[in-house]
Image (tube, rainbow, N blue to C red):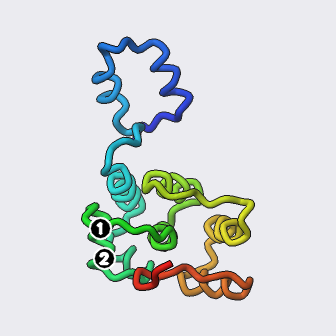
Amino acid sequence: MNEKDTFELESVLGSTHINNFEKYCKENKESILTDDKAFTVYFKELFRKKGLTQQVVFLKADIPERYGYKLMSGEKRTKQRDIILRICYAAEFSLEETQRALSKYEMPKLYAKIPRDALLMIIFNERPGSIIDVNELLIANGMVPLRTSGVQE
């Protein structure tokens, strides 16, 4: 992936003529978030790089496979950030990769000023074990465990 950060894109835009907008979009397609498949492309690329299959990730995330595949294909969308966090954790995403995934799914990033989010940030950095271990840590600290697809907020 040749993804450019916002500063690089803004620099390019500073010297881009309006007639070259289509060229700009084509040359920077990996960096532009307007693609409704950005989440899927990003996840599948990271799965590939990490040598993981979707099936293994869904099993580790404790998410029904069928539901996971529908999320990945874009057939279904979830409003539950915990589902995306489960997938990210099961896929061994770093905190930075997780933050980017949340952004691409148009969900709020983990925020250090929110205690549960802060603990999850530490968990993504330290990787204490399985999703069950993550939930036990959350519960031990008086917080709600990562919800599953069957639980509505």
Q: Place residue 112 in its image quadrant.
A: bottom right
- The answer to which quarter of the image holds residue 111 is bottom right
Which residue is farthest front? Answer: 153
- Residue 126 point in image, percent of width and height: 66, 69
Percent from the top left, x then y, of residue 32? Answer: 40, 37
Q: Nearer the viewer, mark 1 or mark 2?
A: 1
Question: Which residue is identified by label 2?
Answer: 67
Residue 31 sits above or below residue 125 on the image: above
Looking at the rendered structure, the kind of residue marked 2 is: Tyr
Q: Are marks 1 and 2 in contact (CB under 8 Å)?
A: yes
Q: Can you say which quadrant of the picture contains the N terminus?
A: top left
Amino acid type at circle 1 is: Lys
Query: In which quadrant of the rendered view does residue 29 lie?
Result: top left
The residue at 29%/67% (across/down) is 76
Residue position for label 1: 76
Which is more toward the observer, 147 or 58?
147
Circle on res. 8: none
